[in-house]
Amino acid sequence: MLQFLVKRLAGGVFVLLGVSFITFIIGYFTPVDPIRQLMGQHYTYVGWLQLRHAYGLDLPWYQQYYNFLFHCVKLDFGTSIHYQNRSVGDILKDGVPISTELTSWGLLLTLLLGIPAGILSAVKANTWIDTTNMTVALLLYALPGFIIAVFAQVMIVWCNVQFGLNWPVANWGTPWHYALSDIQAKLVPVLIYGAAGYAYFARLARTSMLEVLDQDYVRSARAKGLSERAVIYKHALRNALVPLITSIGLSVGLLIVGALFIERMFNIQGIAHIAIDAVSQGDFPVIQATALSPRLA
Amino acid sequence: MGTSGRGFERVSRGSVTSTVVRKAPDEPEPPLPEDTRPHLSPLQISLRYLWHDRRALICGGILLFLVALALIGPPIYQHIGGISPSDLSGSIGPGLYHQYYHEELSRQDELPSAQYWLGTDSVGRDILARLMQGLLISLTVAVVVEIVDVGLGLLVGILAGYYGGWIDQLLARFTDLMFAFPSLLFVMLLVGVFGSSAATFFNKVPLFGDPGNARLLVVSVALAFTSWPMMARYVRGQTLQIKEQQFIEAAHACGTGDLGMIVRHVIPHLLSILLVAAALDISGTIIGEAGISLLGFGVTDPGSSLGLMIADALDLTATHPWEVLVPTVVLAAIVLSFSFLGDSLRDALDPKRNNC
């Protein structure tokens, strides 16, 4: 067991190192010179050399990577190139509460709705409940979040016109506040954010539960006269949950990619939105930090 | 999307197949089926199965229509329509106003009409023309990425599965890494860093340059780079299974070498599996390209892509929902068609399915 843990931990460290190395090396080989961009019109060769030295960009790559890693461990991602005097941490600080709020609600929705829906589908297999549920899940899984978001926004607009409502189409209220207007703004993005995960877990839970319900020990439990409720919730459910728990880790990637689109579509100023802006501004320290931050968390 | 989807297919189709099987013994002539059956190759059986799958037919039809639209749509569309007054160039024909980059500023945000079949967008460009160009971009990227993906995946996967050893170890570590890195984030990183220089570098190349899709090359490379490890891992698993089977042992006994074994015995068994995996993968690639363009890193504005069309119309959702709905519906149709077709293909090519 200990050996296994050590092995997994070593694997995790390896992955973290690999990810940080890829982010670093892409930034290192960029054909755009950040210092030249920083200086803009005030370019002189001497100044360029000085700034290059000040940013540590004249060191050989392994030393730069070492510095980069060392600073990352201290959660110091350096200084933004686009906003010249702001540290990267300062830029990310605004987005963190919003993104964590979105992610935690999305994950909650995914798990608390997706798994029960899948279990229900398996228990009522081949009834209309199962068929509708799985059709919806299939659609939600196959379609990316941004397509669903467009449909939802058009629906909102239609409802606003039809019923004279004033539901916000794209916004995010104050983070972690739940007045009526906040809930109005947050409801639709969170629902759509959770949709992909919901579909994923519903389908997975259904398959896993169906497999378990076919096993001999479930038949034995029924044969010894346990109530259907006890069979399903005490005997079958616990074993069906095992493969689901292992795949929660995988769904984190799904959540991050989902956040990119949800924050773009609904104009939410979270980390993903900062990452998008940073990429379009060529702000490498910020890009690297946003690429790394989900792994550190 | 794998196993869970399949369970669903199986259950929902169970009743249909069982009735087919039950009918067979009722037929009064026993020798006839004995005569006709051996003439069907496995491929023919699969095709017949696919032909009777209505969902696959509909999806295939939609895809064929969209491909045809992208390929032969623009030249036809540019010959339909009369002369029309323009803001800047006097009177112009359909060859110009049905061009995907032609802006007609006095005719913004129009609904469908005889001149603009799907209306115009916020700077007065024809939505149908932009749609066709966007489809072309989506399909091109999908095909290019799939070729790289399947090629590399097949090569590395077979080497890892057949020989094992250090290639296998390396592949396992590499896929772990790619799992840890959300692929879209990686694509964004690559495009963000190399995109602008690719734009200046490829501007001279006619295919990429002028309509603003120079970054597409970076996008394609990045998408292919993120998707092939999954394919390789999948191929590796299947190769391991095939390697254990008896016909391989028999071929060994006959003195077949490694290369002959791979080319003549392993790869033919992988082809149907690869076809299914590629069909399911294509929808992911198309989503990826549209998503990257939607976030503003793919095709830039004089050019057209489904994702870019959505992004352009996004601010107008409240006032002109039509403009955002058109590309979204088409994108949804492609994506769903590819995934459903992939599912149907998997059922049709599965040798263990229980009819025919």
Image (tube, coloured by chain):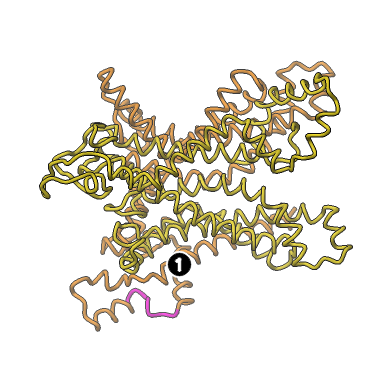
Q: Position of residue B256 (x, y in %)?
A: 82, 65
Chain in orange (letter): A
Which residue is nearer to you in this view: A100 or A196?
A: A196
Chain in yellow (letter): B
Q: Residue at the location (49% across, 76% down)?
A: A62
Most common SS among magenta residues: loop
Residue placed under numbered mark 1 in the picture: A24
Q: Position of residue B34 (x, y in %)?
A: 83, 32
Query: Is A128 left, or right, of B109 in this rendering?
Result: right
A57 part of magenta stretch: yes
Query: Is B300 left, or right, of A148 in this rendering?
Result: left
**Neighbour class for label 1 at 10 Å: few (<14), some, many (≥20)?**
some
Residue farthest right in this picture:
B253
| In the depicted structure, whether residue A44 falls above or below residue B139 | below
| In the depicted structure, whether residue B344 falls above or below residue B192 | above
Residue farthest bottom in this picture:
A46
Query: Is A30 left, or right, of A44 in this rendering?
Result: right
Which residue is nearer to you in this view: A67 or B200?
A: B200
Q: Secondary structure at mark 1?
A: helix
Q: Amino acid at mark 1?
A: Phe
Please state the extent of the stretch shown in magenta in the rendering: A54-60
Q: Position of residue B86 (x, y in %)?
A: 13, 44
Q: Residue at the location (66% across, 22% down)?
A: A125
Can residue A10 be spotted in the picture? no
Q: Where on the picture, by quarter, is residue B124?
A: top left
Query: Is A38 left, or right, of B149 in this rendering?
Result: left
Which residue is nearer to you in this view: B252 or B190?
A: B252
A13 part of magenta stretch: no
